Image: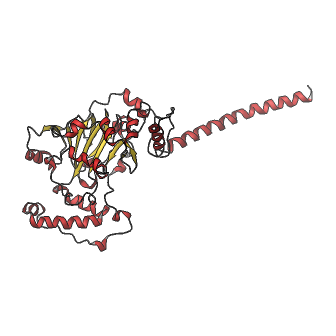
């Protein structure tokens, strides 16, 4: 064998010996890349999608989605949600009553002051919203207006959101976008007209925060426009408030856990919301006592204070909701208010005491004037929250 053949054979042997090591290195690199992608989280991983759009709303929408918590359809949650029947309830139902056959006193005694959830029928029967509000109607009236999306301080023109809900490909998002806007009534005269198209039910007219201006009090009023599969994460409402939530259009599933079920949001993954929670997380908690029901158009959910709750929409839905504070929850609320909005809190106590002075019924409820020894001098100014107004959602 000549020298040249010997060199060729040696090269072949070295390549054969090196090949397994190359394969191992490639496998390790793929594994590391996979782990990196999986651990980057929702906020930094934005799947670009496998389609292009040439229209302006589509282009703007894709650009916007890069900056929000959206994984597009990289994990196939939407397809899984469509293939699994999750309309079967597992928890206990809630009572369903009607304002036509029940009195306000009956509701207060059995549900409001016992902190018991229920569904109330027939509240919005005469609302203009029931006849007028639709996704198309909002496009005609507010197409150029911006709404707060997905519960964040980010805003999107409604015409772009309308494109989103009418795009089959965008609707495949693992974490669907939805409008969750506590500032809709502050966006000009035209938008404020929405307040005239529904009425706060008199069953919920007790609200200890209504003595404050809308700018001062914690956020309390939300407009919701949601796509199928969109929903909240598991949470409780702020400042020990209760809430009413009226469905204008659509179909929504609610799961409620009693206040004592969890000590805090650290007890579960509070980042998972909507369809994904019901598919992946709900099986972990089905054994716990809880309420489980579906809300239909025209129905109002009474959500008592401190109940843990999560929702998912089975259909594209429009709803309006408002939070309120009743006297039995005042003690818990005042402590929370002082921590988040101390300057507003001190004014709130002062105004409440002025009302107690002139209102015998309030005097009786509070057993005299509210005692408060903290002052402006005791406020910790190390946090920006002390200077904020209503940034609680």
**Can you give x and y, in whole percent of width and height, for residue 30 in the image?**
60, 37
In the displayed structure, 168 sits above or below 224; it is above
Q: Quadrant of the rendered structure where residue 255 is?
A: top left
Q: Residue furthest right?
A: 2
Residue 111 percent across, percent down from the top left: 14, 45
Could you tell me which residue is drawn at 51 percent across and 37 percent down?
Answer: 48
| Along the line of sight, the residue nearer the viewer: 244 or 223 | 223
Nearest the eye: 49 or 9: 49
**Which quadrant of the figure has residue 162?**
top left
- Residue 196, horizontal then vertical, whole percent: 21, 46
Quadrant where the N terminus sits is: top right
Residue found at x 71% / y 32% = 19
> Seen in the image, is 122 located left or right of residue 230?
left
- Measuring from the top left, give residue 277's x and y in whole percent: 36, 38
Number of dots carrying numbers: 0
**Residue at 44%, 38% in the rendered image:** 57
The residue positioned 20% from the left and 54% from the top of the image is 325
């Amino acid at each position: 064998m000549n020298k040249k053949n010997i060199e060729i054979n040696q090269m072949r042997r070295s390549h054969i010996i090196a090949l397994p090591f190359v394969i191992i290195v490639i496998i390790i690199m793929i594994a590391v890349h996979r782990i990196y992608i999986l651990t980057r989280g929702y906020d930094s991983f934005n799947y670009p999608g496998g389609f292009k759009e040439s229209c302006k709303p589509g282009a703007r929408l894709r650009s916007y989605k890069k900056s929000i918590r959206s994984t597009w359809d990289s994990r196939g949650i939407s397809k899984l949600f469509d293939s699994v029947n999750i309309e079967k309830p597992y928890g206990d139902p809630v009572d369903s009553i009607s304002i036509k056959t029940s009195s306000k006193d009956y509701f207060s005694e059995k549900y409001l002051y016992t902190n018991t959830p229920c569904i109330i029928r027939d509240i919005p029967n005469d609302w203009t919203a029931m006849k007028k509000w639709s996704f198309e109607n909002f496009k005609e009236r507010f197409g150029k207006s911006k709404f707060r999306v997905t519960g964040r301080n980010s805003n999107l023109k409604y015409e772009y959101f309308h494109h989103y809900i009418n795009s089959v490909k965008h609707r495949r998002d693992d974490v669907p976008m939805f409008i969750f806007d506590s500032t809709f009534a502050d966006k000009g005269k035209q938008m404020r007209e929405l307040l005239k198209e529904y009425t706060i039910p008199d069953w919920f007219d007790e609200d200890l925060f209504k003595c404050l201006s809308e700018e001062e009090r914690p956020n309390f009023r939300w407009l919701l426009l949601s796509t199928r599969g969109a929903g909240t994460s598991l949470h409780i409402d702020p400042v020990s408030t209760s809430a009413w939530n009226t469905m204008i259009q659509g179909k929504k599933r609610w799961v409620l856990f009693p206040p004592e079920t969890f000590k805090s949001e650290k007890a579960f993954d509070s980042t998972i919301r909507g369809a994904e929670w019901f598919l992946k997380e709900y099986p972990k908690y089905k054994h716990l006592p809880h309420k489980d029901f579906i809300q239909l158009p025209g129905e109002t959910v009474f959500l008592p204070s401190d109940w843990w709750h999560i929702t998912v929409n089975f259909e594209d839905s429009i709803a309006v909701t408002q939070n309120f504070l009743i006297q039995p929850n005042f003690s818990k609320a005042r402590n929370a208010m002082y921590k988040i909005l101390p300057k507003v809190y001190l004014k709130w106590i002062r105004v409440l005491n002025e009302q107690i002075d002139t209102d015998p019924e309030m005097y009786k409820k509070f057993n005299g004037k509210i005692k408060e020894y903290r002052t402006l001098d005791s406020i910790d100014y190390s946090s920006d929250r002390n200077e904020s107004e209503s940034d609680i959602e």
